[in-house]
Amino acid sequence: QAKDAGRNAVRFFDPVMQQAVESRAALEADLRRAVPGQQLRLYYQVQVGDDHRPLGAEALVRWEHPVRGMVMPAQFIPVAEESSLILDVGHWVLDAACRQLAAWEKNAQMRNMVLAVNVSAQQFRMHDFVEKVTALTHSHGVNPARLKLELTESVVLNDVADVVAKMRALKEIGVKLSMDDFGMGYSSLAYLKQLPLDQLKIDQSFVRNIATDSNDAVMVQAIIDMAQNFRMEVIAEGVETEAQLDFLKRNGCLAYQGYLFSKPVPVDEFEQNVMISSPEPQTANFQLPPLV
Ligand code: C2E
Ligand code: MG
Ligand code: MG
Ligand code: MG
């Protein structure tokens, strides 16, 4: 509209492109209100061991937009990453994850859960990132060993010495570290042995075709071998079929995440699923009241 077209307005002759730019700008403007307006939500996707028992969860952010409805991270995380908004989103996510861990520590069936949180490169690059993580675990009274940070290979693309120093400092306070979407970029391969990682997470694009594509099968076997040689855990994401699970199990990958077990769900549903799949209380002499 003419009244919105101030002197900074960008005009394209291509109406499709014009619309794309405007809707992205609108999304960014709305995103500014997401944190203060309490519109972000955490969903939890279970991670299971080879006995199919829950080991923990990955926290995945969603944006409950007042008009658009539930917005998925693929639509707004890239927008947030283009500005410093990702720092606000990232801090909100870490704070919410620590609050959830504190609540789980009071619950006999949940207290052993490890919660994995995605950290963006921009967030990790902040000089006070380690201090922020320390402060959040302290203020919520959370055991840092229950918190696992998922870093992507783009994190390592930055100043490697600084990255290693920060990772060591995080290990020092007891936080777990996982390399997310492993195999998507090969940049970190050269540095892998220097990085104090607890876990490699095999990207779902490799998992998708392991049972049918021999190239992907070889890739996944190589990643599993590498993780074992570096004494790291290995987890596969995007496990959807029994055939994929079977291949992973046979090749020594003993932790899984994917729709075969559960999609990401709100916390109530997550807690119920965990209780259903771990019938024996993890604390002796403790009887849970029946589920209503
Ligand atoms: P990711 O960290 O690799 O998370 C895994 C994504 O795969 C999630 O998508 C999850 O819902 C999806 N997924 C899980 N199991 C399956 C499966 O069996 N099949 C298929 N096809 N997909 C599966 P989601 O929740 O849409 O998140 C997408 C990405 O957004 C995440 O990828 C992560 O990179 C980013 N993200 C999510 N939450 C956060 C956050 O709090 N902070 C940051 N910086 N990024 C986040
Ligand atoms: Mg992740
Ligand atoms: Mg991933
Ligand atoms: Mg992925």
Image: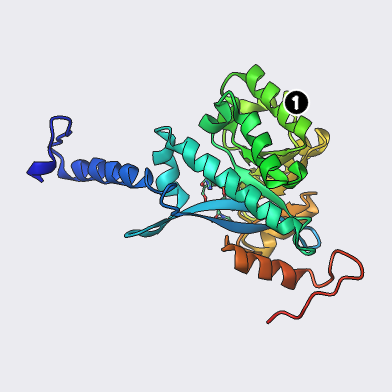
Determine whether 160 is above or below 197 in the image.
above
What residue do we see at 78% from left, 30% from top? 172
Determine whether 260 is above or below 2 in the image.
below
Query: How has the structure been colored for display?
Result: rainbow
Determine whether 143 is above or below 130 in the image.
below
Q: Position of residue 202 (x, y in %)?
A: 66, 44
Amino acid type, callout 1: Lys
Residue 57 visible (yes or no): no
- SS for tag 1? helix
Viewer-proximal residue among 15 and 150: 150
Q: Quadrant of the C terminus?
A: bottom right
What residue do we see at 26% from left, 46% from top? 23
Q: Position of residue 253 (x, y in %)?
A: 76, 49
Q: Position of residue 260 (x, y in %)?
A: 64, 64
Determine whether 285 is above or below 115 in the image.
below
Q: Which residue is mark 1?
A: 193
**Residue 79 shown left or right of residue 289 in the figure:** left
**Residue 57 shown left or right of residue 264 in the figure:** right
**Residue 240 shown left or right of residue 230 in the figure:** left
Q: What number of labels is visible?
A: 1
What residue do we see at 61% from left, 67% from top? 268
Q: Position of residue 279 (x, y in %)?
A: 80, 73
Q: Residue furthest right?
A: 285
Viewer-proximal residue among 57 and 38: 38
Residue 278 visible (yes or no): yes
What residue do we see at 69% from left, 52% from top? 101
**Disc 1 residue crowd, few under 14, some 14–19, many 20+, Cα 10 Å:** few
